[in-house]
Image (tube, rainbow, N blue to C red):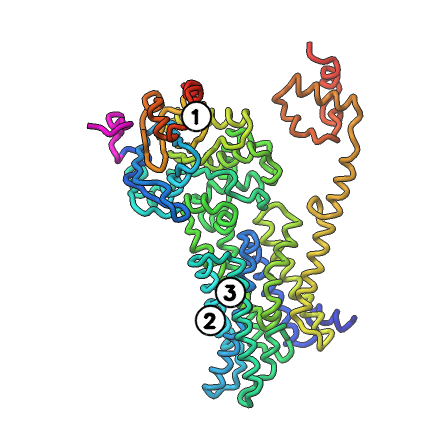
Amino acid sequence: MSAFLDALLLRTGYNAALVSVGAMLLGLAAGAAGTFMVLRKRALVADAMAHATLPGVALAFLAMVGLGGEGRALWGLMVGAAGTALLGLLAVDRLTARTRLPEDAAIGAVLSVTFGAGVVLLTVIQTMSAGQQAGLEGFLLGSTAGMLRADALTIAAGGLVAGAVIWVLRRPMTIVAFDEGFATATGIDVVRVDRIGMILVLFVTVAGLRIVGIVLVVALLIIPAVAARFWTDRTSVMFWVAALIGGLSGWLGTALSAAAPGLPAGPLVVLVAATIFALSLFLAPRRGVVARAVAARSSSGRLDPSEAARWIALRHMEPTSPLIDEDDGRTPLSALLPPDRLAALDRGPV
Amino acid sequence: MNAVGRFPESLPALADSPLAVRGLSASYGGKPAVIDADVTIVPGTLSAIVGPNGAGKSTLMKAVLGLVPRQTGDVTVFGQPLTRMRHRLAYVPQRASVDWDFPVRVLDVAMMGLHRELGLLGRVRPHHRARAEAALDRTGTLDLARRQIGQLSGGQQQRVFLARALAQGADLFLLDEPFAGVDAATEATIMSVLKSLRDEGKSVVCVHHDLSTVADYFDRLLLLNRRVLAEGPVDLVLTDRNLQATYGGRLSVAQLAAIR
């Protein structure tokens, strides 16, 4: 427990602290970018992109070994990952636009084919003796073991840039996600906004590979966003809440992983996010399960007949009264009107 | 000699027209939806685009705005290409085209109308908010400003959409089926707002499907069934022959009698 506390307070050494800060910034950017993707209803495209990074990681490793290096420079692997992820994204777009394949089928096809190719390449690499291939499979589920300072800084910088771009573009992104036709008519370049959103997701995905891993990085995009939805009815707030949940998950998840060596960071980050989601699902005011159950319970009590008669009298005597909107079947009119108006209603129309 | 159903003597010079379309063709789902359409909107009028289901009314409006690709045709707005005149134009899409569970409040939707002025980083100042609220007030939805849009009735949603367009401060309003699925009170409110816009000298174009209200609501009428079959003042265009041409001879005598 005290090991966890130390990790939480970034007291487990310089590198572990950097990893936590990196994961926090990554989670922040993932929450914000994921909000746009979830509202745009394209979150699963991110999953196809994430899986399509694996062949890129393997190819980049091979290329770096071929050039005489160790093959473990994170920036090199990230460039390779981004390359094949972009190809995967293009493949989904083309399959959807040019064939009769619906988008979900295109996503499934690209996701499985690219991931399969990546696993084959990874297996080939493991039979080779060249380079330091140990740890490459850490990209599957994420691993903070042996992470370097430069790695953590790369990830943090990626998260920070992505977060800043989203902050600048939050208004057009909201309008595009809500009403594409209106956005186009007012002169917003919808295709460009979508493209920037995809590039941001690509950025987050690639930056997140090392910590969260290929298989789970999409969870960091989706879970904070859908959890945030429970707490607010405004997109502008949802961006911030999702970023907060994402950042919190990254920080707590990596701290847990540092406190219990051997437990992989990626799944822990995702499990923390999922816990926050579960809490939101049950406890959020108004939209949460508990609040809804309470509301449903209290609305089952009907008004007594004299209060119901007052509502009907109001509708007859003042058909345009704004109060009529307040009639939800359980609010007594006596709570809303002064006694003299009530008396007039009770007397009925003259 | 003029083609059947055309009244060019009443048309403004192209450069003065709020919206002029020449030879527009567009397809929808691979089939031609609008063929070779000419439209000339007269400034300061209420115009309806009317035709049967599948006649390409919405497609025509969307093709004008660039929401669906045009195969051929030119569009000018106040004599200029559309891309330079977007700030003078406001579009109200069909209510059913968006997800009303989306996390925005009524006031947020109205504020979207100010997007061009605010830009990416512009701060929302009190006079911006005041304009959005004035637009909501004009459509009778100011009381709902803090509600999430999913809590509104269909008619209230449509009025909020109109408020967003009002907040844009445009001179040309394009509305796609503004009366579809709304209550009678909303229809009256929307119509009185549109008429007041017309009286301020603005131009309003509605895709409309209710033949029985065309003569009451609109000054000018364009009958469309993939091709433009008639365009002009309502009293001149709304003839039995034009309607039968537009509706493929499917209107009964009783229906025709009810229209005028």
Q: Which residue is mark 3?
A: A202
Badge 2 amino acid: Gly
Q: Which is nearer the eye, A148 or A330?
A: A330
Badge 3 amino acid: Leu
Secondary structure of the magenta portion, mostly?
loop
Which class describes the residues within 10 Å of circle 1: few (<14), some (14-19), or many (20+)? some
In contact (CB < 8 Å): disc 3 and disc 1: no
Q: Which is nearer the eye, B6 or A291?
A: B6
Q: Is residue A27 magenta?
A: no
Q: Is residue A169 left or right of residue A229?
A: left
Which residue is rendered at x = 77% and y = 23% of the image? A307
Name the residue at the left extreme: B1
Which residues fall within the magenta stretch?
Answer: B1-15
Q: Is residue A226 left or right of residue A190?
A: right
Secondary structure of the residue carrying tag 3 is helix
In the drawing, what numbered circle is on residue B211?
Answer: 1
Q: Which residue is mark 2?
A: A83
